[in-house]
Image (tube, rainbow, N blue to C red):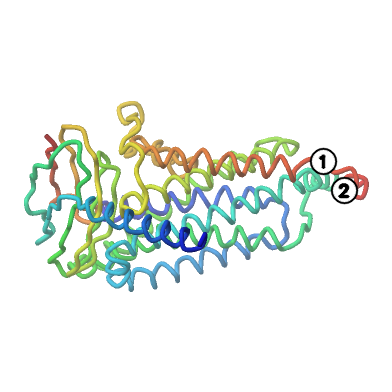
Amino acid sequence: MLGIAVLVFREVLEAALVVSVVFAATRGVDGRGRWIGAGIAAGIAGAILLAGFAGVIAGAVEGAGQELVNAGVLLAAVIMIAWHAIWMASHGREIALHMQAIGSAVSVGRRPLTALTLVVALAVLREGSEVVLFLYAQVAEGFGAADVAGGIALGVAGGCAVGFSLYFGLLRIPVRYFFTATNWLLLLLAAGMASQAARFLVQADLLPSLGSTLWDTSTWLSDRSLLGQTLHALVGYDARPAGVQVLFYVITGALIAIGMRVWGRPRRRGLTRAA
Amino acid sequence: MRYRFLMNLIVASGLLAGAGMLSAQEPEFRLVIRDHKFEPTEMTLPAGKKVKLIIENKDATAEEFESYELNREKVVPAKGQVALFIGPLKPGRYAFFGDFHKDTAKGVLIVQ
């Protein structure tokens, strides 16, 4: 049961951290709980479907199907996060002003929510399909229902607990800086996902590695440790990155930062209308 | 005339790219998963070369090939076969394992 719990925990942890950042970034938006809940549900359904087709996908595109699916899912999430972060850079200030004035929920429209709902669904899909395959193997190899159910419950509870602590930690950031902070978190999240996508494409030999191990920090902070994994999921920490991963990371981060700068400048018109 | 020159250029660069891909045929190495164990558990690879690693799963359930040292992970479906590329690597020992059966599925690549 413990072995099952550990694997489930690790996968749930990564998805839960993404969900927490999204949940924080959508603070003050009406009905966000329903949207994000729908994203999680869609992700789980997709994960089961993806696991069912694992054999077909692995064999597709001359054996590169799995990497293409993973990279595609990651890059789709990167685009959605970038869109949201840039949108928030131009509207976040107004929302924060409203929140300070009213102190609670503000309706800011649906547009950014659909993008982040997709991000949640894609994160759950990616981590979930591995869990489904793993659990299927455990059941097929004769683990009892109690063992499997207990392992799932423990793993999910543990992963969600870390996610909740991150969320409530983020809530302690003063409202004035809150969306700036969540926006930077979204930027790092997207950069990390882009780096992971690059790694999958190198693994399939669809991208040059530009140095298969640019540096090795595994003795300082291992990918296996809880902190290493948390930072991996949140900001894309990788103890042994390939050169092209670093390139993807930097370019993605820079593009989103530029986008936030260009469209995020306080607009006179917008501000007077808000006041 | 100019268009023909352009066409020739495109065809020539296409041929060059094709030739480049053919010459870049990586050496292949094979691992087999049977009864949730890797065979062989130790394999020697050449240093400084990109290598294609083929993993065949003879079991009725999926496995995930994973290695922190190689920075690689890939699901190997039940009764299936996958390939992945690693390296060029520095000489050393690179441990790998099956994430779905950590107790039994273990091995190491020796790069020299």
Q: Examine the image and state in which quarter residue A215 appears.
A: top left
Residue A167 pos. (x, y %): 58, 45
| Residue of label 1 | A266
Residue B102 in the image: state x and y as whole percent: 19, 50
Identify the subunit bearing mark 2.
A
Amino acid type, mark 2:
Gly
Corner quadrant of residue A218: top left
Amino acid type shown at disc 1:
Pro
Residue drawn at (62%, 64%) of the image: A35
Q: Can marks 1 and 2 be said to lie on one chain? A: yes
- The location of residue A64, given as percent across then percent down, is 31, 61
The residue depicted at 32 percent of the width and 60 percent of the height is A150
Tell me which residue sits at (72%, 45%) in the image: A89
- Left/right placement of residue A224 relative to residue A86 reads left
Furthest-front residue in this view: B1
Q: Which residue is mark 2?
A: A270
Proximity of marks 1 and 2: CB atoms separated by less than 8 Å: yes
